[in-house]
């Protein structure tokens, strides 16, 4: 049995992770039984932060940590490795001519392979992961068969399939992961994240963080907005407001909110009578008028 409570606390402290206790517990348990982990959640919910912490935590214990950021251009050889043509001409198909990719290295050396935004990986590349994930074997034609080190494991992140511009991850690949879903954190935890990530240190830190959190929360609840802001919007907003001489001025809050949130929210399609700027302005003014923030 693993001491999950202790491990979770250690990860939170080492990587400045606020909350996520339940999810970290699930991750620690999945890892303890040798499972690969897929973190799914909306834009900015904290997937990369959490996955990176896990990968580094277990990677550093086992002394290795490999990261791949996916795009449509990520081909199998970027993941597995390839024979370098000039070296093949000089030496033939031998070990020295082969450039190992992150998957092969993680399997040989052990530790964690962190695959960020795996849903952006082309299908051909996804296929090259399959045998590594369930049989811990990687075939390199003309060279060798790699059998994974016992500490090899994969942590991946993905945006939900409903999200625009996201391809659906192959069924075969999804099947090989333990799935952990991330939702928005509680307002209390978000306020702590905003304070930590925006380096708020003035006497107004509490108030700035609370107002910023409230503003983004309302963007998620507004019926005019299809996609509200993630915590990133609040971090940007608080960081900006903190730079003004007067963080009590509603004009400054509106200006900073438009800058921070304009490209982070998407309006509902259809006959909207208000512009995005007006919608943001109204939300900010409504929040500033709340008695808690007077
Ligand atoms: N639990 C948390 N503790 C501390 N900081 C956090 C936490 N969750 C999110 N953050 C902060 O919020 C920001 C966004 O997080 P992150 O980049 O991990 O989100 P993401 O889900 O990977 O986003 P995307 O979908 O755009 O890739 C980062 O600055 C990160 O530091
Ligand atoms: Mg990310």
Image (cartoon, rainbow, N blue to C red):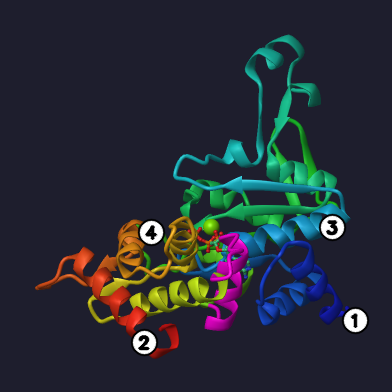
Q: Please name which of the two marks, 4 or 3, marks the residue nearer to the observer.
A: 4
Binning the other alpha carbons within 10 Å of mark 2 as few (below 14), some (14 to 19) or many (20 upward) gives few
Label annotation for residue 260: 4
Residue 6 sits in quarter: bottom right
- How far is mark 2 from mark 4, CA to CA? 21 Å
Q: Which of the two discs, 2 and 4, sits closer to the camera?
A: 2
Contact? badges 2 and 4 (CB < 8 Å): no
Residue 34 visible? The answer is: no
Residue 94 at what x, y percent from top left?
78, 23
Q: Position of residue 291 (x, y in %)?
A: 39, 90
Is 14 in front, or is 179?
Answer: 14
Secondary structure of the residue carrying tag 2 is loop
Residue in the picture at 66% in, 40% down = 80
Mark-to-mark CA distance, 4 and 1: 45 Å
How many numbered circles are shown?
A: 4
Q: Report the disc number at residue 1.
A: 1
Q: Magenta stretch?
A: 185-204
Q: Is residue 197 magenta?
A: yes
State the quadrant of the N terminus.
bottom right
Question: Which residue was labeled with disc 3?
Answer: 151
């Amino acid at each position: 049995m693993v001491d999950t409570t202790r491990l979770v606390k250690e990860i939170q402290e080492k990587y400045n992770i606020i909350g996520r206790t339940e999810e970290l517990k699930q991750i620690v348990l999945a890892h303890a039984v040798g499972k690969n982990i897929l973190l799914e959640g909306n834009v900015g919910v904290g997937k990369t932060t959490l996955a990176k912490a896990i990968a580094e935590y277990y990677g550093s214990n086992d002394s290795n940590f490999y990261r791949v950021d996916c795009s449509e251009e990520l081909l199998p050889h970027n993941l597995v490795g390839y024979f370098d043509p000039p070296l093949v001409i000089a030496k033939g198909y031998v070990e020295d001519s082969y450039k190992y990719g992150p998957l092969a290295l993680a399997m040989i050396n052990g530790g964690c392979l962190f695959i960020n935004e795996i849903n952006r990986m082309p299908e051909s590349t996804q296929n090259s992961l399959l045998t590594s994930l369930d049989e811990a074997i990687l075939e390199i034609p003309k060279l060798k068969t790699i059998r994974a080190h016992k500490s090899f494991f994969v942590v991946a992140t993905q945006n939900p399939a409903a999200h625009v511009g996201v391809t659906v991850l192959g069924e075969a690949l999804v099947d090989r992961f333990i799935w952990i879903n991330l939702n928005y954190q509680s307002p209390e935890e978000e306020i702590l994240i905003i304070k930590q990530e925006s380096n708020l240190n003035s006497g107004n830190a509490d108030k700035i963080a609370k107002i910023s959190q409230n503003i983004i929360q309302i963007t998620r609840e507004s019926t005019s907005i299809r996609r509200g802001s993630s915590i990133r919007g609040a971090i940007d907003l608080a960081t900006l407001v903190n730079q003004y001489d007067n963080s009590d001025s509603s004009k400054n809050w509106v200006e900073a909110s438009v800058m921070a949130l304009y490209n982070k929210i998407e309006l509902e399609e259809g006959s909207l009578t208000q512009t995005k700027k007006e919608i943001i302005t109204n939300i900010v003014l409504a929040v500033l008028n709340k008695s808690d923030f007077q």
